[in-house]
Structure formats: structure tokens, C-alpha cells
Image: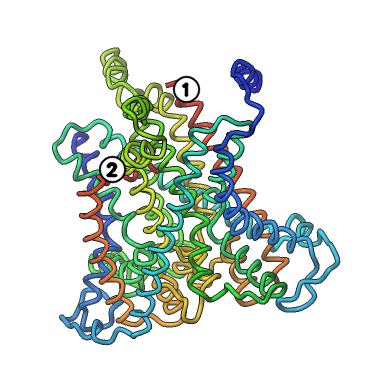
Amino acid sequence: MRRLALPGIVFATFIFLAAPVLIVVVASFNSGAVLSFPPTGFTTRWYERINPLFLHAVYVSLVVGLSTAFLSTVFGVPAALALARGRYAGRDLLNSLCLSPLMVPALVTGVALYQFSLAVWDVTGIGLGGTIPGLVLGHMTFGIPFVIRAVIAGHARFDRALEEAARNLGATPLETFWRVTLPVLQPSIVSGAIFAFLMSLDDVPIALFVGGGDATTLPVRIFTTVEFDFGGDIMAVASLIVGASVVLMLLLDRLVGLEQFFGSRH
Amino acid sequence: MLANGSALAGARPRSAAPDVWLWVLLPTLAVLGLIFGLPLADLIAVSVHEMTGPAQVGDALTLEHYRAFVTDPFFLVMVVRTFWLGFLVVAFCLAIGYPVAYYLARTTSRWRGMALFLVISPLLVSAIVRNIGWFPILGGSGVVNWILMSIGLIDEPLRLISNFTGVVIGLVHALLPLMILTLTTVIQRVEPELEEAAANLGAGPALVFWRVLLPLSLPGVVAGSLLVFAMAISAYTTPAILGGNRVLVMSTYIAQQFRTVLDYPAGGTAAALLLLFAALLTLLALRVRTKGGEAG
């Protein structure tokens, strides 16, 4: 009996963890009311009824996610190298400063950006609220620190002798950087960029306050929709996201290794 | 710590010119300052100004909003509710997470990789989707109520969603993987031989847990709990969706002030306080973990 208790708890936990994800798929094919169980029949009509607004939101999410990942890498990698290799006073403080956005609740960052974009508009007439560039800037607040953290962690395992070897063999500093340093750091750069992308796709609080109108991401579109009404097409959209996540998960597991990917986060 | 740092700095020959790496860091610092530092400073500045009308912030300085937070029962109750939510989420995450982490840390089964995958994979499905998934499960005609009524445990459906209960369930679900991963790492560092030794000396499983396993894994338990607590009180999406606009915690209050009430100074004050709580808890968690790491 005791021997079975532990696996029992573990198994129940897995069901608990998987339940809301699996039920979304089941409910999306329910021909009756999507929120009632057991399903009364099979239908694909919820999928046919998906509001085109959701399609546009997918486009916004992808553009914002990819731009965030790219720009976060552009600004994050040099900063990570500067923090890992530099010898100057206040380096630890600068390091904490660069990672500090991760300690701030996303909602607080979101309302701060909302408030600030109003102030910027008052003073300069530049309106970033409700635009895709605004969303990207908002998501870079966590994207840059994620990339910095991943690259610093990867750099800790970096063997500097490789660079010395390249230099001794006649490579210029620039060549050494492009052909030795960057390739060695590539896995951590990639996992930092993927993480920034995933977090951008997932974010609600910042995109809710910075975006709006045409610049509404998929999670925010879902969020604002379920605030008022809970239709079957929401389940269909959610179920498609689950499908995309599974594909992504398998890809990620193949490319980076899931355990490593999430293990390196903290 | 400080003495150690300056001794190191003294030992190294210091060049007069600032390190070139500082110049490399500069653009990123400038960007983060512009998109994060300034907006945050502006938000805190707004919180010490008067509200002169909807979406209007006056010029006069005031600490009135902060005073209200420590004197007005409305805010006190809200802060207590927020912390109670964090406490409940941590308690459930620990109670469920510890046995699961213990299993993952100790098992030699070939299913270990699969089990770990099952723990991690929900993290990769968008938070908004996981939130929505609770409606067909916890709703009035959802799975749980259907099961409970089918086996005759209840006659009326239980209210499990669009209230505080729903928020607790959703947050436990969201944060449990994090707790399990943290605890698994810690328990792995406790050598199984210690448990065996205690058992050989006659200690029962409960005693082994209380006197050996728990004390040795305590730094990880504390660090994980502080992190989960910080994330639970900071969360907005889950309390907003699963609370169904009925659960007023700090995060939902902040969003309300900025989205509908348009009292920016009041919202800014709550945001500044939430930021303070979350940052302090996270720093504390990091400190506990580093200490535990040094000891282990």
C-alpha cells in the first residue's frame, strides 16, 4: 500500500497538470455547449466559426515575437559578453541592473509603459501605445534580460583557451570572435532567443496595456474576448494553440533538450 | 563580502582608461533605461501626485495614496487577501510538489525522462490557454461537478470558478512545475545513503522525513516557496480570468485603476507596492538559494 502511495500521487499530479490542456481539445469538438461535460456529440463547426480577428492576432503575435527575439539578441549578446568579460568597478551592480526587469511583475511593467507612453505622447507627439513597435519595445524589457542571463550562463562554461589557440594560430581578434567565440556560445544564444520569443507569445499584461486596436496579440485577443463572452470558437482557437505548442515542444526537445532548456532558466 | 571584493580589486593592476567592455554594455543599458527604467520611474512619480480627474494627474505632490494603503481597511483587506492567496498557493505547491519531486529525484525508472517531460510540458502551452481549460473542468456543468454529482457526493454543483477558489487552483497549476523542478534539484543533492542510515537505525519513514530529508532540503524549500509566493502575488492573467472580475487582489486592483477607473496615482501606488513586495521576496529567495548552494 505504502509502496503505491508515491506513484499514485505522482500520477494524480500528472493528470492535474495535463487536464486543462487536454480538455480544451475535447471541448472544442463538443457539439453541445462547450463548457459542459460529457460532450454530447462531435462537431467541427467551432473551427469554422473562428473570428478573422484571431487570425490577424496570430500575425501580430508572430511579428512581435520574432522582432522581440531578434532585437533582444542584438542588444543582449554584447551586454552579456561585457558583463561576463569586463573588468570594471560596479560590474555586479550593472549585472543586477540589466536583469532587474525580471524581478518586476509584468503587470507593473505594463502599466508603467502605458503611463509612460501617454507622457511621451504629451511631450513629443510620438504615439507608441497601440502600435507593433510599441509592443516590441515592451517585450524587450524581459527579452533582453532573458538573453543576457542565458548567454552569461553559457559563458561560464566557456573555455578561453580556445580563443588563445585561435589567436596563436594567427587569427585576428575579429576573426576569433566570429569563428570561435560566437559558434561556441551559439547554443546559449539560441536558447535565450527562443525563450524571449516564447515569453513574448505568452505575455498578456504588457501587451494588454501597450497594445490595442490593430496591435492586439493573440493572448490579449483571447483575454479580452473571454472577459465578455465564452463562445465555442475560443475553444477552437485555444485547441489550435495546443496543437502548435505540441509541435513546438517536440522541436525544442529535439533541438535543445527540454530539461536543459528549463533547467538553465534559474 | 565587501572586504573580500576590495582586496581582489586591489590585487589586480588597474588601468587608467575605462574598460572597453563598458562601451559595449552602454547601448543595451541605454535601451533598458529608456524602455524600462524611465517608465518605472515615471510610474512611481505619478503615484506621489494628486489625481485631478479621470486619467488626469495633477502637479501637486502628495503621499495620500500611500497613507490610504496603511490606514484604509479596504486596502488592508486587499493586501491581506493578496498575501493569503500567495500563502495558499505555496502551501498546495509544497504539499503536492514535494512528493512528486522526491519521486523524480530518487526514481531509477526508465520513465523518469517521460515524467520530467510531463511536468515541464504544461509550461510550454500558453498561460491563457491553460486558464481557459479550467472552465470546462471547474464550471457548473464541468467535469468535476459532473463526477461529484454522478457518484452522488453532491446534489448542487459546487462553485469552483470565477471566485477565489478558481484563482488558487489556476495559480497552483501554473506554479507547480516551477516548485517541482526546484525541489527535485535540492532533493537530488541529499544523499540517499543518509536516509538509509536513518532507516537502518530504526527511524520510520515519517521520522526520516522530518529529521533528515526536510532539514537537508530546507534551503531549497524556502527558496522555492519565496519564488512561488512572489509569482503568485504578481500574477495578473490568472486572477483576472479565473476570478471572473470578482477577486480583488493587488494585481486586479492595479489593472482596474488603469483600465476602467482611470485613477493613475492610486493604481501607480499599488503597483509600486506590489513591485516592492515581489522584488524583496525574489531577492530573499536568491539569497537563500546561494547560501544553500554554498553549504551543499
Q: How far apart are the two marked residues, 1 and 2, measured between alpha carbons?
A: 24 Å
Q: Can residue B181 be seen in this view?
A: no
Q: Where in the figure is residue A127, as x and y percent of width and height?
A: 61, 75
Is residue B57 in sight in this rendering? yes
Out of A266 and B144, give the one closest to the viewer.
Answer: A266
The quadrant where residue A218 appears: bottom left
Q: Where is residue A8 in the image (x, y as percent from the top left)?
A: 22, 44
**Residue kind at label 1, given as amino acid type:** Glu
Check residue A255 in the rendering and tell me which mark sits there, or answer none.
none
Residue B290 point in image, percent of width and height: 49, 29
> Picture quarter containing residue A17?
bottom left
Determine the residue located farthest toward the right in the rendered image.
B60
Judging from the image, what secondary structure is the residue with disc 2 in?
helix
Labels in figure, total: 2
The residue under label 1 is B294
| Subunit that carries the residue with mark 1 | B
Q: Residue B228: x and y, percent?
A: 47, 46
Q: Nearer the viewer, residue A109 or B13?
A: B13
Q: Which colour scheme is used?
A: rainbow
Determine the residue positioned at 78% across, 60% down: B48
Query: Which residue is under mark 2?
Result: A259
The crowd level at tag 2 (other Cα within 10 Å; few <14, some 14-19, many 20+) is some
Tell me what residue is drawn at x 49 percent, y 61 percent. Answer: A139
- Residue reaching furthest left? B110
In the image, taking residue B196 as reference, residue B28 lies left or right, namely right
For the residue pair A159 and B147, the one nearer the viewer reads as: A159
Asked if residue A105 is positioned above or below residue A95 in the image, the reply reads below
Decide which of A231, A175 is in the foreground and name it: A175
Q: Is residue B102 above or below residue B81?
A: above
